[in-house]
Amino acid sequence: QVQLVESGGGLVQAGGSLRISCVASGNIFGINVMAWYRQAPGRQRELVASITSERLTTYADSVKGRFTISRDNTKTTLTLQMNSLKPEDTATYYCKAEKINHLPAWGQGTQVTVSS
């Protein structure tokens, strides 16, 4: 089983930057895709960005050019660098890890609040 722990959320003014991280532990062998999702109050959880074990990345249109997802060489730490933050980026951000033939693992979430 994979455990995910996020950190780094907080309060930032619009236009500012924030970096959030997610550390994977447990049975991490075989994790292929890791991703960041977010969920704002009253809205569905949505994909923000994902990265494969080959470091192929995808981004939601709303964050392209502002957010950067990365994984370290051990592939156990996932990071999301968020620049030019907007109030609409306010949400709880969740880390997700996927392995073939396993249910995905989710972190507990970290709150990001962007003030206008």
Image (tube, rainbow, N blue to C red):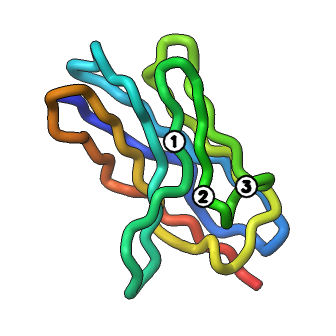
- Quarter of the rendering containing residue 92: bottom left
51 left or right of 103?
A: right
Q: Which residue is mark 2?
A: 60
- Mark 1–mark 3 Cα distance, whole angstroms, equals 12 Å
Dot 3 crowding, Cα within 10 Å, few <14, some 14–19, many 20+: few
- What mark, if any, has residue 11 been given in the picture? none
Residue 15 versus residue 77 in the image, above or below = below
Determine the residue positioned at 64% across, 69% down: 11
Q: Earlier in the sequence, mark 1 or mark 2?
A: 1
- Mark 1–mark 2 Cα distance, whole angstroms, equals 9 Å
96 left or right of 79?
A: left
Specify the amino acid type for callout 3: Lys
Residue 112, x across and y down, in percent: 56, 65
Residue 105, x across and y down, in percent: 25, 41
Dot 2 crowding, Cα within 10 Å, few <14, some 14–19, many 20+: few
Determine the residue positioned at 58% across, 37% down: 79
Q: Earlier in the sequence, mark 1 or mark 3?
A: 1
68 left or right of 25?
A: right
